[in-house]
Amino acid sequence: MALIKADGTALYQGAVLDTSEHYWMDGMVSEYAHVWDMENHQFESVNVGYYGADGRDFIGTKVEIEVSKEVARDIIRTLKRRAYEDFCRSVIEKKNSIEAGITAKVVRGRKIPKGTILNVFWVGERPTYNGYGTELIAGCKDKEGNKVWIKAEYLKNITPLKSPKAAERKKYMKWYVKKNTGCLVLQAAKGA
């Protein structure tokens, strides 16, 4: 069993993970069931109860928390794929980031010739000229040791960084899955 509507139809069988409530200022209470949608492979919240100040339920849906083995394994598969994509995205961002201690190449601008290689020793923010927001500025040194201040967006990171090892990726993926699933899902996936 899972969600049973007032007319007797059952929804999300074996895919109800948890319930929560929201208390409104007028004394009403909304109850939500957190379910897994097998077609879209994502979590959803379904409104299953709306209680008046007198305790009367206006929706009339009954909820039983239940996670089947197939649903739990689908959740874990989906989260592993998302963790892998997130890990890859973070590695690419790290390799492209401008920070202190890297070597960068000038790709834009007119004061410093394009193609100039600079060593970045400082990165910080300063207010923009129009007064709205801030921009990232990099303090760099050229081959002769002259200090140069340039917008970070005009630079490209050319420092060869090592890619993370497979063990680091597996550790991140394990942490990501554990963080985003509950004990109920992990136990159901094992078949316990």
Image (spheres, rainbow, N blue to C red):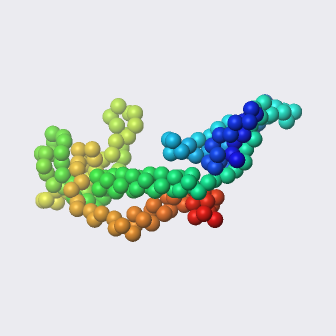
Can residue 139 be seen here? The reply is yes
Image quadrant in which you'd find residue 188: bottom right
Looking at the image, can residue 186 be seen? Answer: no
User: Does 146 sit left or right of 88 as displayed?
Assistant: left
Compared across the picture, whether 24 is left or right of 88 comes to right
> Does 187 sit left or right of 113 as displayed?
right
x then y, percent, for residue 136: 33, 45
The residue that appears at 59% across and 57% down in the rendered structure is 69
Q: Is residue 119 above or below residue 57?
A: below
Residue situated in front as seen by the camera: 2 or 124: 2
Residue at 42%, 65% in the rendered image: 170
Count of labels shown? 0
Looking at the picture, does residue 4 appear above or below residue 139?
A: above
Residue drawn 62% across and 40% down?
Answer: 45
Choose between 41 and 122: the one closer to the eye.
41
Q: Residue furthest right?
A: 54
Residue 141 image-quadrant placement: bottom left
* Percent of width and height locating residue 165: 34, 67
| Residue 49 place in picture, x, y as percent | 74, 36
User: Could you tell me which residue is drawn at 64 percent across and 46 percent down?
Assistant: 13
Residue 159 versus residue 119: which sits nearer the camera? 159
Foreground residue, 71 or 99?
A: 71
Residue 121 image point, x, y percent: 27, 59
- Tell me the quarter of the image containing the C terminus: bottom right
